[in-house]
Amino acid sequence: MEASVIICTYHRPTLLAQTLNSLIAQDLQPDLFEIIVIDNGPSSESLRIVSDIRKKSRHRVLYAIENNQGLSCARNRGILLSKGKVVAFLDDDEVVNNDWLTQMLSIYHTDAKIGCVGGKIIPVFPNNEFPLWYSPDIKGFFGGVDNGDEPHEIDFQAEYLGGGNISFKRHLFSDLGMFRTDLGIRGRTFYSGEETELYMKIFKKGYKVYYNPKALTYHLIEKERVSQKYLARRAFQNGISDAVYDYLSTRNRYTKSWGYAISTVSRYVLLLVKSGVSLIKRALGFGGGTLSAWLALCRSTGKIFGFFKRKQPEEETSETSFSTQTFEKPLSFFIVTYWHDPRFKKRTGGIIRMFSLADNLTKMGHRVTMVLPKLGFPKKQTIARVIEIPLVDIPILRPIFFHLLSSLYLLWGLKDASVIYVRQMNSFLPLLIARLYRTPSVYEIPNDPFLAYESSTFIRRIFEKLTDKAAMSLSNRIVVLSEWSKKRLSEIGRIAPSKILVTPSGTDTNLFKPLNKVECCKEIGLDPSFSYIGFAGSFLQNQGIEILIESAPLILDKYPNTRFLLVGDGPMIDDWKTTISLKGLQGSFIFTNRVPYEAVPKYVGAMDICVAPHHKETNQASPVKLFDYMACGRPIVASDIDVIREIADTSGCILLTEPENPLSLANGVIRLLENEEERDSRAALGRALVLAKYDREKITGSLIQSISAII
């Protein structure tokens, strides 16, 4: 696809309709570009307008909601969804010529080093009447851009481009990062600077920024903005943006000194004085343009205000790129994990994520040693070095022998380790040994321990609490899998938030990827003519599959051509099969039993909709299969619980339903079965978000960066 056109909208459905109608009239073939609408102030009217456009055009039109306020957040969401080689941005109050996109793209073909192209913007006032006080030198306050009538490379010392008519090569966002979310318009607040910051990055990378006046847009000015009061407010806010951008673009140790403060404030005060003198002279008749002088004064005042008001935001990590800490020599990691579940004899499913961590660290050039029980065939699960601790398969002796034997090995082997990474296992011995050797240590708590304590016997609960408390105290950092877990650990466990790292479980996006449903069905022996509602994972009580079974008759009543595909096994399988039999639903449910991990993507690929109907009190801190579904590009219906809402609130890819409510689950599934466009949109959002934030290789790089302070 040649281009993606992103329109970010905020409570302006009428203007949005005009923008969309001008876009679908482009002279470019519909299959060469897509239209993406990101709604930052969602309304049913905006959704209706987008739906109408879909019906009357042959373009790929996506609609997504961005709950985080701000133009930068909305633009970044659009970038994640985009597929075009070039990403173009329009405001929701603009209309374009029918050759606008053709002209925009044509410049890129002239020079491979062109990374950004902007066009001319002509302000259009209500009734096509300029206000009496209007002059060309204030067109920028109305979004106007006119850098001449010939295409040329931009000179930012004398020219500028407008964010409402701009485009970028898509790969630059992966290389340079996306728009800063601590800059940019939020609602009706017109702070800016995010585009300038990106232009400067492009220059430093060696790319060119071009202007093409033939890529023409018309900016429709709302009546409420045609006032000098609005202009003064806009100028003042632009001044605040200038001050914040000045600080961010030069930030270093000097910017925190009194010297920086004095020199910057002095420069801003001098501008204020010059603006004031200019205003007085023009008011007395010496030169025209009193309004432009007044706006310059407002902007200078805004700069001073912005300097004292400015925040010092954390350096942002690009949503499309995780930078990793570099070291002069490879690190030596020891990963210690104990996992045994009598419900899953000789299977290593519980520590697949640990194998992924070990593999990714090894691929990065680090030395990794895994210490784990000889359960199944662990050496075949990873490319890292594995120390197998013999498993004495007797209930009480099993953990005791592992902890003692693994500790003896660590006493000998840990002396040369750079870091020890211990997964929660009711023992603090590895962390105590790490303290003896002064080896930096990380303790991972994969699920909510406080909910787990409640299900334990009194003696076991006391033991688990004491060992966990000791382990958390001995470790240098604690890893949890979600912000929800961090909050609970901080509030209930009274652990300092600065000690807790959030590292989502994520998924392997090379293994889990979108596949063709028909081909997947044929490979695993399913009839592709059915609609499949699917679940993949361990058959445990907290997964809530009994809720899916209760909802099945409601779904089948409306869509009888539906089948329910359950992939996996576990202790609940017999209970669920019995319930299905009692309800006479045997013909509608398909149990695959356990399948090889590498084959799971084919089964997910056969699903039309994936479900995660977790119970309210699930202690899963980061449901792994949710990320697998998203990576496979499948729409998801899931319970509205904290750990899932944390993902859904920032992505919009998951349709949330009331937990433990079969009717709510059924309505969610039926809604997606009825609406193919919504299914596709949520699926695309999920895949894009996983690639950006939840790819395990990127998560590993981010983890190394986070723990670099203790190495």
Image (cartoon, helix red, strand yellow):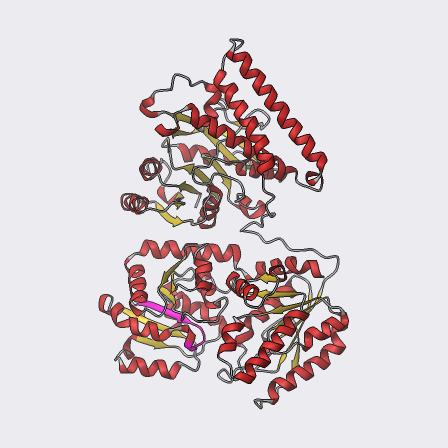
The residue nearer to you, when weighing 98 against 617, is 617
Residue 275 shows up from this direction: yes
Tell me where the magenta segment starts and ends, as one range: 531-541
In the rendered image, which quarter is residue 536 located in?
bottom left
Given the current orientation, which residue lies at the most extreme left position? 557
The location of residue 349, given as percent across then percent down, is 52, 76
The location of residue 505, given as percent across then percent down, is 53, 65
Q: Is residue 173 above or below residue 275?
A: below
Is residue 126 one of those drawn in magenta? no
Number of marks drawn: 0
Given the current orientation, which residue lies at the most extreme bottom position? 394
Q: Is residue 167 above or below residue 450?
A: above
The location of residue 431, given as percent across then percent down, is 68, 73
Question: If the image is split into quadrants, where does the C terminus sit?
Answer: bottom right
Which residue does the image show at 76% across and 68% down from the upper left?
438
Residue 113 shows up from this direction: no
Is residue 535 one of those drawn in magenta? yes
The residue nearer to you, when weighing 348 against 663, is 663
Q: Is residue 656 above or below residue 9?
A: below
In the rendered image, which quarter is residue 664 located in?
bottom left
Given the current orientation, which residue lies at the most extreme top position? 285
The location of residue 183, given as percent across then percent down, is 53, 40
Q: Is residue 446 left or right of residue 544?
A: right
